[in-house]
Amino acid sequence: METTIFLVRHGETVDNAHQIMQGQTQGKLNQRGREQAQQVARRLSSQPLNAVLASDLHRAVQTAEIIAAPHHLHVQTTPLLRERDWGSFTGRFIPDLKGEVWPDDIETEEALLARARSFLIYIAANHPGQQVLAVGHGIINKAILAVYAHCTMREVQRMLNAEVRVLTITPDAIGIDCTATLTTSDTTASAE
């Protein structure tokens, strides 16, 4: 059965606007980010959705709650959609990082791709034939798109804040074993 995923990057945050590497910090949408999420909510308001999932980081949950409000759906959170762990680069001004040697405490691309694959396994196994909204972050979304398209992350175009990409998956098409069981947790959806 085909499952449709509306993959969204969270709305703009205070740190995005200031070019700060957020990594797995919670983050908070700024006014522009809330407006971006509201625009996505309006665009998808007539789109039937069966489930809404988000990273367990605040900026993604905020975005998902705004988008889920017209659908009266709860937001399920999962660490599978967390942004890449940028280790000691976290909290730093992004332009200052150019040319620096990457420290050993950054999450590897292999680990990131494995997490992306686990997310797709979870969706295919738990939401067959459904339409699912998933709110993540720039780099994890890029990894999900790379696994989906069977390409490298470098071949995937960067997602902008509150951008939506639509994926249609079947277990066979992405070569996944749907017998895997992964967990998520629920938060109450509300428009902020």
Image (cartoon, rainbow, N blue to C red):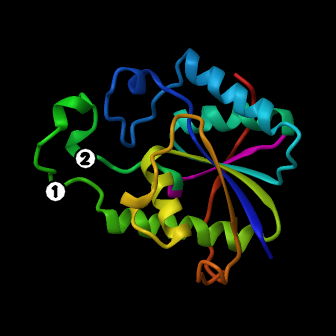
Residue 83 image offset from top left, x and y in percent: 43, 47
Q: Amino acid at mark 1?
A: Asp
Start-end of magenta stretch = 72-80
Q: CA distance from mark 1 to mark 2?
A: 8 Å
Please give the name of the residue rendered at 73% of the width and 35% of the height, measured from the top-left corner. Answer: 67
Total marks placed: 2
Q: Would you say residue 107 sits in the magenta stretch?
A: no
Contact (Cβ within 8 Å) of mark 1 with mark 2: yes
Q: Which mark is residue 104?
A: 1
Residue 129 image offset from top left, x and y in percent: 82, 69
Please give the name of the residue rendered at 46% of the width and 50% of the height, measured from the top-left corner. Answer: 157
User: Is 8 situated left or right of 113 in this image?
Assistant: right
Callout 2: few (<14), some (14-19), or many (20+) C-alpha neighbours within 10 Å? some
Question: SS class of the residue under badge 2?
Answer: helix
Which quarter of the figure is the C terminus placed in? top right
Q: Is residue 67 above or below residue 124?
A: above
Q: Amino acid at mark 2?
A: Gly
Q: Is residue 92 visible to us here?
A: no
